[in-house]
Image (cartoon, helix red, strand yellow):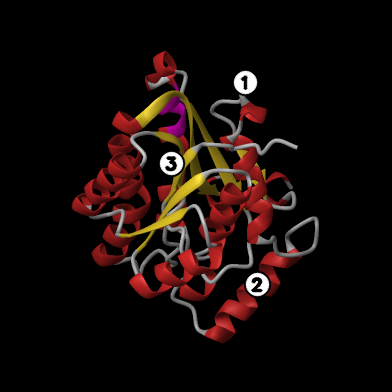
Amino acid sequence: MSKKLEGKVAVITGGNSGIGLATARRFVAEGAHVFITGRRQAELDEAVRQIGNHVTGVQGDVSRLTDLDRLFATVKQQRGRLDVLFANAGVPALTPLGSITEEHFDKVFNINVKGLLFTVQKALPLFVDGGSIILNGSIVASKGFEASSVYSASKAAMRSFARCWTTDLKHRKIRVNVISSGPIETPILDKAGLTPEQAGEAKVSLVATVPLGRMGRPDEVAKAAVFLASDDSSYVSDIELFVDGGMAQV
């Protein structure tokens, strides 16, 4: 059986843990060479070790444009082109209205909006015509959860980017799609500024609103990413693919 991404070159930002790491594993298993980024070198090195072959780790922060330049310079030097970009890096920081600080806003928008924009823009010179760009969105762009207004707005901006970029890139036949996941078992919830007790309570309350009655697994998002990266989705562009157990629709 032929592999879905045989010979493809892919970049996954935030590929050192969670959804990014699961997707990197899937992409490699389907025949791609994958470049992954992460801010913490030790975690990045461990992710590369876990994946094994056909992976290159490039330390960097997507909100730093010089780090992005270094990433794509590495891709150009080693592979010379890019077929797939999974813009996955993001932060979920939660703060209720009334307590939002400038620092909170800047952190979320610098990574989730500015970082996303320049990740895609700086990737374009390497992209082959007909390539695939996948943006890692969230159901929060469609729902109104407590204390998530800044995070939700950043993901809504991502959805708008996808619509505009689909038009901007139509002459190059580059497809832009969004995966909007629901609650997924990843370390990111534990890094959302919550105590362990709060994180546990949040998971229980989230699961109660999911029709399928459970958290999702990172690999379930990764399989959706493989579909959007591959020729299986050759006539799919500017969709928002919900991987959320039905949560956004009910």
Query: Circle 2 sits on which residue?
Result: 203
Query: Which span of residues is magenta-colored?
Result: 162-166
Q: Kindly identify the residue that appears in the image at 40 percent across and 21 percent down.
A: 169
Q: Amino acid at mark 1?
A: Tyr
Which secondary structure class fits the magenta region best? Answer: helix
Residue closest to the eye, 9 or 94 = 9
Q: Residues within 10 Å of mark 2 (few under 14, many from 20)?
A: some
Decide: is 102 above or below 42: above
- The CA distance from mark 3 to mark 2 is 25 Å
| Marks 3 & 2, CB-CB < 8 Å contact | no
Q: Residues within 10 Å of mark 3 (few under 14, many from 20)?
A: many
| The furthest residue to the left | 66
Query: Circle 3 sits on which residue?
Result: 158
Q: Amino acid at mark 2?
A: Lys
Query: Circle 1 sits on which residue?
Result: 235
Of marks 1 and 3, the one in the foreground: 1
Q: Is residue 163 magenta?
A: yes
Tell me where residue 111 sits by quadrant. bottom left
Q: Residue 65: give x, y in percent of width and height.
A: 21, 49
